[in-house]
Amino acid sequence: MHELSIALEMLDIAGRAIGGPKPVRSVRAVVGTLSGVCADSLRFCFSEVARQEGFGAAVLEVELRSATAVCRACGGGHVVEDFTEGCPACGSLHRDIKTGYECEVVSITLEDDDDGECSRGEGNSAGEVARDGAE
Ligand SMILES: [Zn+2]
């Protein structure tokens, strides 16, 4: 199962960020709608694996990020819901996808940590989960 390996990798990232497995309240992740990841399945796998790997009752909070693109013809930015539809401004189908492929751990909240969030900087590639393309 694809989501199982992603959950394992997210916990590996979390473990490295906090210095080994310890009780975690929550892990926040950004998952793009083009990433091919099923958020419900990922949340389920994450909880199961977290308990087994020593992270306690960690909950995965998934922030879904929609697909956005910049039109190559007119430069306009837009949300892409249907890839067969062109740019809403000029109708062009030529575009550069800007968001939607994300699958990243963005922050970790420890169980015994009231306000201490271990945030990862935006664009920090260490938090990015490698996509193996296998569904
Ligand atoms: Zn356009």
Image: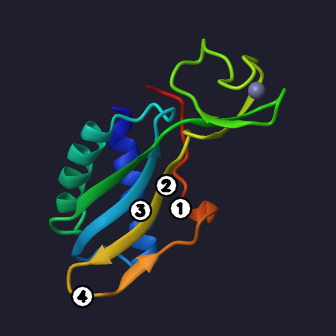
Q: Are marks 2 and 1 in contact (CB under 8 Å)?
A: yes
Point out which mark residue 127 bears.
1
* Image-quadrant location for residue 133: top right
Mark 4 against mark 1, which lies toward the viewer?
4
* Image-quadrant location for residue 26: bottom left
* Image-quadrant location for residue 64: top left
Q: Secondary structure at mark 3?
A: helix
Q: In this rendered view, identify the residue nearer to me: 71 or 128.
A: 71
Q: Which residue is mark 2?
A: 104
Residue 54 location (% of width, % of height):
22, 68
Q: Secondary structure at mark 2?
A: strand
Q: Residue at x 69, y 23 (%)?
A: 87
Residue type at the position of mark 3: Asp
Residue 110 location (% of width, % of height):
28, 79
Residue type at the position of mark 2: Glu
Q: Residues within 10 Å of mark 1 (few under 14, many from 20)?
A: many
Q: CA distance from mark 1 to mark 3?
A: 10 Å
Point out which mark residue 114 bears.
4
Residue type at the position of mark 4: Asp
Q: Residue at x 45, y 72 (%)?
A: 16
- The tag earlier along the polypeptide, 2 or 1, is 2
Q: Which residue is mark 3?
A: 12
- The tag earlier along the polypeptide, 1 or 3, is 3
Residue 112 location (% of width, % of height):
21, 86
Q: Find ligand 1 in the image and state its quadrant.
A: top right
Q: Residues within 10 Å of mark 3 (few under 14, many from 20)?
A: some
Q: CA distance from mark 2 to mark 3?
A: 12 Å
Q: Residues within 10 Å of mark 4 (few under 14, many from 20)?
A: few
The relative height of residue 76 versus residue 45 in the rendered view (above or below) is above
